[in-house]
Image (tube, rainbow, N blue to C red):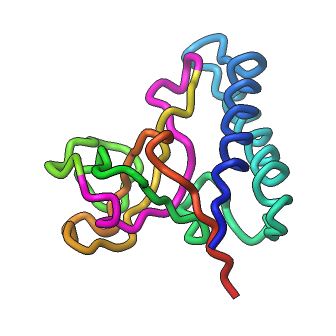
């Protein structure tokens, strides 16, 4: 297991800058600009995260589905979290009754960075992740969650 947070932070900053300077939609109907940004964003991810780790980026649908090789760890005493009301949905209501957990309770895997407003400037403040295991809060396994990125380290678990 290797802490790869530095690669993700580099990607986060490059992605935010590229999007906020060059790919801001001109209207609420400007989906082409956002689609172009998504292509560039995936290229950034493969170059800034996958390449330094020697990960074959063709084998995964990066930034669209949970990446089991990237686990999320909290180092604090409690982890504030927004959990989706419905399992396996990346949209909907983020108001599950569990909104704070012990840092070692949930097993989280990285999916992508998340911003509420896709039309304005972005910050990538949140990490969208999937809950794939739990010690105590078993009722939220297979739910998606949002956690502010500064609460987490990203750990690379190389699969054989």
Figure quadrant of residue 123? top right
Q: Magenta span covers which residues?
A: 101-121
**106 shown above or below 157:** above
Question: Residue 137: x percent and y percent?
Answer: 20, 66
Residue at horizontal 57 percent and vertical 57 percent from the top: 154
Q: Is residue 104 left or right of residue 100?
A: right
Question: Residue 150: x percent and y percent?
Answer: 49, 39
Which residue is outermost to the left? 97
Q: Is residue 83 left or right of residue 5?
A: left
* Viewer-closest of 2 and 121: 2
* Viewer-closest of 40 and 27: 40
Location of the N terminus by quadrant is bottom right
- Let me know if residue 107 is in the magenta part: yes
Question: Residue 141: x percent and y percent?
Answer: 30, 69
Which residue is outermost to the bottom? 160
Question: Residue 57: x percent and y percent?
Answer: 79, 64
Location of the C terminus by quadrant is bottom right
- Let me know if residue 103 is in the magenta part: yes
Residue at horizontal 66 percent and vertical 11 percent from the top: 26
Residue at horizontal 36 percent and vertical 61 percent from the top: 88
Q: Is residue 40 left or right of residue 116?
A: right
């Amino acid at each position: 297991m290797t802490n790869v947070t530095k690669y993700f932070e580099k990607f986060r900053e490059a992605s935010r800058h590229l999007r906020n300077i060059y790919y801001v939609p001109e209207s609420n109907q400007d989906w082409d600009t956002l689609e172009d940004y998504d292509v560039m964003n995936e290229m950034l991810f493969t170059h800034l995260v996958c390449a330094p780790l020697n990960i074959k980026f063709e084998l995964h649908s990066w930034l669209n589905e949970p990446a089991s090789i990237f686990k999320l760890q909290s180092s604090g005493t409690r982890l504030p979290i927004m959990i989706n009301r419905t399992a396996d949905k990346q949209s909907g209501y983020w108001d599950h009754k569990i909104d704070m957990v012990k840092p070692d309770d949930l097993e989280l895997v990285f999916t992508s960075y998340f911003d509420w407003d896709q039309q304005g400037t972005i910050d990538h403040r949140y990490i969208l992740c999937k809950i794939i295991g739990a010690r105590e809060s078993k009722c939220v396994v297979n739910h998606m969650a949002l956690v502010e990125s500064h609460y987490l380290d990203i750990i690379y678990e190389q699969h054989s």
